[in-house]
Image (spheres, rainbow, N blue to C red):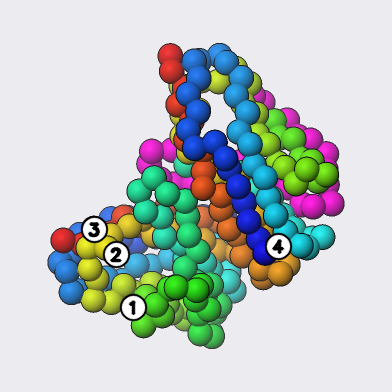
Amino acid sequence: GAVVSQHPSWVICKSGTSVKIECRSLDFQATTMFWYRQFPKQSLMLMATSNEGSKATYEQGVEKDKFLINHASLTLSTLTVTSAHPEDSSFYICSARVITDTQYFGPGTRLTVL
Amino acid sequence: AQKVTQAQTEISVVEKEDVTLDCVYETRDTTYYLFWYKQPPSGELVFLIRRNSFDEQNEISGRYSWNFQKSTSSFNFTITASQVVDSAVYFCALSDNTGGFKTIFGAGTRLFVKA
């Protein structure tokens, strides 16, 4: 099946720094990618929809200036958490959509902000 | 509006027992898709099944089976003869036309299977 990778798989950073997470579709092209956040023992919450070549669409309550999303190519989307704080510590998961009903998820990135 | 409800927060069973995980969804659309995912402790989501709104046929895959009932807006998941390796969090999810086919997830059900 199709593979989506995320890099890094985990990251620890100091409060106030920015962290970039990459999401790549390895063997297919994806015009649409999604970013989710999952706090411990909670569900996946959709943060934003990323379309190649256009601005991301953010879900209500998600700060677009804090979570910068760039989808520069059909195989790569990046999420940058700017000025990270401990409350941003979470598990970030991306997915890439091939067609309407088919979405492939990455393995996730665990972010810890000290 | 889209909504997925998994009322069971945690379920604990003994190995070889059958267990059913409930999922109730809400959507105004006639075209929509339902999913089940497994999330083991590693965190990586494992796709289990996709069902579109026009296909109410139940499905069986090994020890797994799914019951899709449009009349009650439910898409329940049954594991037969559960095993310890089935211990995980299971998510039911929905995507529909009004939501731009973004996938939203239920709260998840944590399943513990004891030996």
Label 4 secondary element: strand
B12 inside magenta stretch: no
Q: Where's residue B27, x and y in %?
A: 72, 59
On the same chain: label 1 and label 3? yes
Q: Where's residue A111, x and y in %?
A: 28, 59
User: Is mark 4 in CB contact (under 8 Å) with mark 2?
Assistant: no
Label 3 secondary element: strand
Query: Any mark on residue A112, and which?
Result: 3
Looking at the image, tell me whether mark 3 or mark 2 is earlier in sequence order.
Answer: 2
Chain under label 4?
Answer: B
For label 3, the crowd category at 10 Å Cα-Cα, with few meaning under 14, some 14 to 19 and many 20 or more, is: some
Between the C-alphas of marks 3 and 4, the distance is 33 Å
User: Is mark 2 in CB contact (under 8 Å) with mark 1?
Assistant: yes
Q: Amino acid at mark 3?
A: Thr
Q: Where's residue A73, x and y in %?
A: 50, 78
Looking at the image, tell me whether mark 1 or mark 3 is earlier in sequence order.
Answer: 1
User: Is mark 3 in CB contact (under 8 Å) with mark 4?
Assistant: no
On the same chain: label 4 and label 2? no
For label 4, the crowd category at 10 Å Cα-Cα, with few meaning under 14, some 14 to 19 and many 20 or more, is: many
Between the C-alphas of marks 2 and 1, the distance is 10 Å
Q: Amino acid at mark 1?
A: Lys
Q: Looking at the rendering, which quadrant does residue A62 occupy? A: bottom left
Query: Any mark on residue B51, and which?
Result: none
Q: Amino acid at mark 2?
A: Asp
On the same chain: label 2 and label 1? yes
Chain under label 2?
Answer: A
Report how many numbered discs are placed on residues in the image. 4
Q: Which residue in the structure is indicated by mark 4?
A: B96
Chain under label 3?
Answer: A
Query: Any mark on residue A66, and which?
Result: 1
Whether residue B5 can be seen here: yes
